[in-house]
Amino acid sequence: MNTGEERMTSDHQPPPVNDGFGLMPLTFRPGRLRRLLGHHAFSIDAELIEVSGQKLYYSEVETVVAEGNRVKVGLRDGHSFFLRCGHESGPLAALIRQLVEQAGEYNSYKSAPAAFGADESMQLFERTLCFRALPYVWAADILLTTAAVNHFSDIHLEPLDAAKARLTFRAAGKIRRSLDINMHHHQRLLARLKYLAGCHSHISDSAQEGAFRQADFDVRLSTFPTDHGERAALRIITALAFPDVASLGWQTGQTEAWLEKLRNNRGLFIISGAVGSGKTTAMYATLSELAASDRGLRVVTIEDPVEAKISGICQASLDATREKDLAAAFKHLLRQDPDVIALGEIRDSACIKEALQAALSGHLILATFHAGSPAEAIDRIRQMGIEEYLVFSGLRGILHLELKNTDAGPQPRAELAIYCGGRLMESK
C-alpha cells in the first residue's frame, strides 16, 4: 500500500564511543614543575584550540602529528604550535584530527546549505549525531536549515518503539521523506530543540509548546508524551513567498472572482482546506493585497501565533493580547474599529460565533477553517451549535483550497463557493 511517504534508508549508528577524554571542552593544565619547564595550558573545543592566549580555528589547521609526549599542530600559514600532554599524544592527535574533519563538514554545509540536496543534508545530519563535539547543537541546526531551504513546512519526530524514532518532513501537504534514528539520539536532539524553544528540557511527561528564531526564519515546537517517549512537531515559518493573490497559481478567473467578492461585500469569508493546502498563505496574500489597495483599508489580524510577517497590516499574536482564547481577544479588537479583521484558525463555537456577529455589524472578516469541502465546512459550523440565523446572515462565502497531484507535482486548486439564501452556489 502506498502511504505517500518516501523512505530514506539509514544505518542506525549507536551512541558515540567514549574515547576517555570526557566532555568538551577539554582543558590541559600542567603542574608547577612543567610550567617551569615551559609547558603551557591549552583547551580544545568543538571549533578551535586555545593555547598561549591564541585561538587556532580548525579551518586554519593543516596537519596534526603526535611527536613523543606532544602534539604538533601545523597551520596553513606555516606556523606550528606544540601541545604537551604527557603520554596521551597519540589519542589526543587522533581526537584533534577528528574534530578538524567534523568541524570542516559542518562549516562546509553552513557556508552554502542550498548547495546540498535534501538527501545529502540528511546524511550529514545522521553523521553529526555521532560527532565528538556539539553533536545535537549542530544536528538541530542542520535539521532546521534543511527544512527551511527545501521549503518543508513541518518536521515530526515520533517514537516508534523503545529503540528508535522516526523523523519525517511535510511539504505541500504531503509527507516527503523519513528516516529512523536511535532513541538515544532522539532524546538528546529533542532536549536541544526544547532548550531553543524555551521549554523545560528535563520534563518529558507533559505536553509543552514554545517558539524561537533560527537564522532568518521562525520555528514553533510542540511536544506530546507517548508510551515510548516524546513526540515533537516543528512548524517552519518563513517569509511569505507570494506577494499577491495572482502569484498563488489558481485557475484562470479565480483570483479576480475572490478579490471582487471581498471588495464588494461585508461579512465572514472562510478559507477552508486540509492541512498544508495553503490556507494561511492564501489569507496572507489576500490581506496584503487588500491593504495595498487605494481604498486605504485598515487590516488587523489575531493569530495563535503569527506565522509570517506581512508589510502593510497590523498583526497580533494571541499571547500578546493576554487573553485566553481567540474569541475573547476578538471582542476587544472590534472596539478598535478596523476595516478588515483576519482570524487564525477557527477551532471552537465561541470563536466562529463572535466572527459571525462581527460580520453582521458590517466588518469584513477572514478566517481559516479545517474542512474537506465548502459543504463540509457548513456542516461543521452547524454541528458546533451555531444559530441558523447567524450562519444565514453573517456567512458570505467559502474559498476552498486543495493540492492536486499532477505530472509537474502538486498544483493548487481553488474553489469559491458563495453562500446566499442558505445555499452554497459553487464557482469551480
Image (cartoon, grey):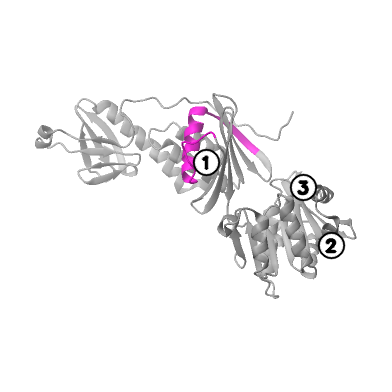
Residue 63: percent from left, percent from top: 29, 36
Q: Quadrant of residue 97?
A: top left
Distance Cα–Cα, label 1 vs label 3:
31 Å
Q: Is residue 112 visible in the rendered structure shown here?
A: yes
The kind of residue tagged 3 is Ala
Q: Which quadrant of the structure image shows residue 117? A: top right
Report which residue position mark 3 lands on. 371
Q: Position of residue 304 (x, y in %)?
A: 62, 53
Label 2 environment density (alpha carbons within 10 Å; few <14, some 14–19, many ≥20) = some
Asked whether the residues under the numbered discs 3 and 2 touch, taking CB atoms below 8 Å apart as contact, a structural biologist would say: no
Range drawn in magenta: 176-205
Q: Residue at x 31, y 37 (%)?
A: 25
User: In the rendering, at what x and y percent does residue 24 appear?
Assistant: 33, 35
Q: Is residue 228 above or below residue 336?
A: above
Front residue (pair 242, 217): 217
Number of other residues with Cα within 10 Å of mark 3, as a class: few under 14, some 14 to 19, many 20 or more: some
From the viewer's perspective, tell me whether residue 238 is left or right of residue 330.
left
Distance CA(mark 3)–CA(mark 2) = 21 Å
Nearest the eye: 160 or 363: 363
Give amino acid for label 2: Ser
Quarter of the image that includes the C terminus: bottom right
Residue indicated by mark 1? 143
Q: Is residue 203 magenta?
A: yes
Which dot, 3 or 2, sits closer to the camera?
A: 2
The residue identified by callout 2 is 393
Q: In the rendered image, which quarter is residue 105 located in?
A: top left
User: Which callout, 1 or 3, points at the residue further toward the start of the chain?
Assistant: 1
Residue 17 against residue 150 in the figure, above or below = above
First-in-chain label (3 vs 2)? 3
In the displayed structure image, the side of residue 307 where residue 380 appears, left or right: right
Secondary structure category for the residue under label 1: helix
